[in-house]
Image (tube, rainbow, N blue to C red):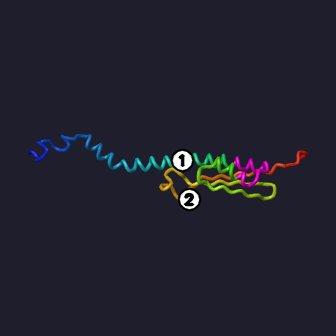
Amino acid sequence: VARAGLGGVGWRGRFGRQGIVLAEFAVVRPDVVLVLALSLGALGLAWDQIRCVDAARSGARAASRGDSPGAVILVTSHAAPSDAMVSVATSGDIVRVSVVSRPRVAASLLPAWLRASSTASAARESSDPQQ
């Protein structure tokens, strides 16, 4: 029995396994794209975490030397990811510098509570060379 429009060849005979593979790929492709986007987001967040740690340490080092709070924030912001929030707190002779950053890569796919952050503390160095 010949089917009209196919010239006597059935669907499987005309497209064979290629058609099935293409159909399966069309179903799986959104999942592959989602996994790829989440993977890139996780890698970007890991990179931002490393930059937050480096920035907090740089800021704490600058604060321990006695730099002004504005200079500490400038040094920290320069090393931190863009749009990171930097805070400096002093308690006695201890200075704390905190850096918090939202994910920049695939941020809309990641939960809102997920952030890269780091806090570094340092003791203020004495300005008296005798100590």
Q: Is residue 118 left or right of residue 28?
A: right
Q: Which residue appears at 29% of the width and 43% of the height?
A: 21
First along the sequence among labels 2 and 1:
1
Judge by depth and name the residue closer to the eye, 35 or 71: 71
Which amino acid, by three-letter code, is at mark 2?
Answer: Trp
Q: Residues within 10 Å of mark 1 (few under 14, many from 20)?
A: some
Which quadrant does the N terminus fall into? top left
Q: Nearer the viewer, residue 67 or 106?
A: 67
Q: Amino acid at mark 1?
A: Gly
In the structure shown, which secondary structural element does the residue marked by tag 2 occupy?
loop
Q: Residue at x 12, y 46 (%)?
A: 5
Residue indicated by mark 1:
44
List x then y, in percent, for residue 92. Answer: 81, 58
Q: Which mark is residue 113?
A: 2
85 to the left or right of 95: left
42 is within the stretch colored magenta: no
Q: Return the mark for residue 116.
A: none
The outermost residue toward the left is: 1
Going 49% across and 47% down the picture, which residue do you hit?
39
- Residue at 68% x, 57% y is 87
> Is residue 123 toward the left or the right of residue 9 in the image?
right
The secondary structure type at the circle numbered 1 is helix
Q: Main secondary structure of the magenta part?
A: helix
- Horizontal and vertical percent position of residue 13: 18, 40
Between marks 2 and 1, how big is the CA–CA gap? Answer: 16 Å
**Residue range corresponding to the magenta coloring:** 56-72
Q: Position of residue 63 (x, y in %)?
A: 75, 51
* 17 is higher (above) or lower (below) than 38: above
Look at the picture and state if 70 lies above or below 2: below
